[in-house]
Image: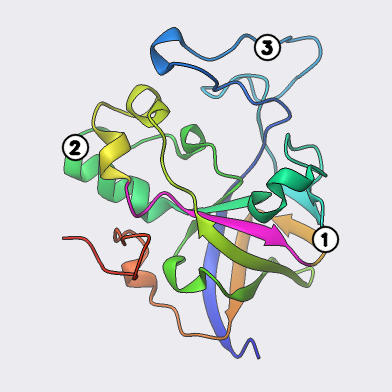
Amino acid sequence: MLVHRTPVEVLHLLVSPVHRYFGRPKDGPLPFDTDEHQGDGGATGPASEDRESADVVAGRGIVGDRFFGKAAHMDAAVTLLAVEALEAVAAQLGAVPFDPLLARRNVVLRGAELEPLRGRTFALDCGGGPVLLAGRRPAAPCAWMDRQLAPGAHAALRGRGGLRCEPLGSGRLHRGAAVLLSDVPLEPARAGEAVLPRGGRRLP
């Protein structure tokens, strides 16, 4: 039973039709066709869109995203990230605040402690009804973070890179106020803390 209700805010909904980050970070992202993929034209490039809303389809993913309908990626078709994690890393590295879109997670939340949701079924309700998700595994940071965010970000994001989820239900997500529904209590104050992938041990 999803008896615990945690108020959160959906800050960003990133839909990326094209995966541009292959190979070595020093070589830069792959080129994109600006006529084929139009978007915000910002730091993430026209191949990504920061949307006001995004449609989730059970067993398929986010409509328009590069992993939509791909069975091999279904347990990671929707990625969540707590913006507090990026804020903590920026403070740790003495860097200016990061653009959350550069982390390449689909749903950027404020006030969401994600670690307790790993291995559990939960829902995100943006006002149009709950969208059921299963927290499958951590969204481990990759070496691209050192290039896209700041030197040292790859290591600093260890244990707080977000959560990869399987879409169990369909519905629409919106930016703005929302509620996380879970069967375990969540502590928003811990949203930016790093946690080891195995055993849930908090990092210093």
* Residue 122 against residue 25 in the figure, above or below: below
Q: Are marks 1 and 2 in contact (CB under 8 Å)?
A: no
> Callout 3, which amino acid?
Phe
Apparent side of residue 16 relative to residue 91 in the rendered image (left or right): right
Residue at the spot of label 3: 32
Which numbered dot is residue 58? 1
Start and end of the magenta stretch? 158-168
Which numbered dot is residue 93? 2
Q: Counting other residues with Cα less than 10 Å from the Cα at mark 3, is it few (<14), some (14-19), or many (20 or more)?
A: some
Q: Nearer the viewer, mark 3 or mark 1?
A: 1
Q: How many marks?
A: 3
SS at mark 1 in the image: loop
**Residue 29 location, x and y as percent?**
53, 15
**Residue 60 location, x and y as percent?**
82, 51
Q: Residue at x 52, y 67 (%)?
A: 8
SS at mark 3 in the image: loop
Q: Nearer the viewer, residue 110 or 199?
A: 199
**Residue 198 location, x and y as percent?**
36, 64
